[in-house]
Amino acid sequence: MTHILLILILQLCYVPMLALRTICMVKKLTLLTAFFGFLEAIIYVFGLALVLSGDQSTLAMVVYALGFSLGLIVGIAIENRIAIGFRSVQVNIKSENNILIAFLRSQGFGVTVFKGDGKQGPRYMLDILAKRSREKELFDIIESYEPNAFIISYEPTRFKGGFIEQLMKKQSAKGPSRFDLNNENIKGLKKLFRSVVGEVKELVKPKEDSV
């Protein structure tokens, strides 16, 4: 029985590692991708070895597959929890709702307003950039002010210029070093450490941060 439980636990750990490694790879977080890949490989080898060793019972194979399925659920829950990345949201409304626009900006959302011509007259489009961790909050705000708004949400992959790049530069400039290190080896280790810290911050961003 211990053998079966160990297989289940390993699979519950393996699949979330797989999910985190994939997320980091998509987000180009090199060091974290390598770290989670290392853990994933170790867990995979141990789990597979347990299944293929001994009498190779049908129960062990079923538990192995069941653990993989449950691990997928855990992996999705983790990904939704940490909510890495940003969302670009386009909101189409009938009138220029200045109260909504002002409130969104006061809450830290970047909002750009466009005016266009629709089939039934003028339309206004709000182009909003938000962290994924705040997407539901954004939708709730829009719903409260404009319940009939047409909303499209998608994930941008690259940024250049604008409000978000300025914000990222300000965040990366925080916490300057108190030491002036001249040794090149120490500087290299310091740069590596900063890279890991930066990738961890990118992976696990607090929900209360403003965009």
Image (cartoon, rainbow, N blue to C red):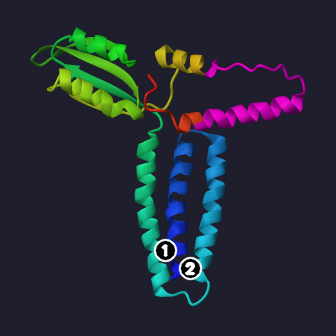
Secondary element type, mark 2: helix
Label 1: which secondary element: helix
Give the Cα distance between marks 2 and 1: 7 Å
Q: Label 2: few (<14), some or many (≥20) within 10 Å?
A: many
Q: Position of residue 149 (x, y in %)?
A: 18, 25
Q: Is residue 155 above or below residue 43?
A: above
Q: Is residue 125 left or right of residue 182?
A: left
Q: Position of residue 151 (x, y in %)?
A: 24, 29
Q: Residues within 10 Å of mark 1 (few under 14, many from 20)?
A: many
Left or right for 68, reference 124 = right
Question: Circle 2 sits on which residue?
Answer: 51
Question: Which badge, 2 or 1, comes first in the chain's sequence?
Answer: 2
Reply yes or no: does residue 67 show up in magenta: no
Query: Is 178 a magenta residue?
Result: yes
**Extreme residue toward the right, this view:** 183
Q: Position of residue 124 (x, y in %)?
A: 22, 14
What is the magenta segment's predominant secondary structure? helix
The dot on residue 81 is none
The image quarter in which residue 97 lies = top left
Where is residue 111? Give x, y as percent: 35, 16
Q: Residue furthest bottom?
A: 55
Q: Residue at x 37, y 31 (%)?
A: 134
> What range is drawn magenta here?
172-200
Residue at the image point whose x is 51% and y is 28% from the top: 158
Task: Say which amino acid is labelled 1.
Answer: Tyr
Residue type marked 2: Val
Q: What mark, if any, has residue 64 been given in the picture?
A: 1
- Name the residue at 44% across, 79% down: 62
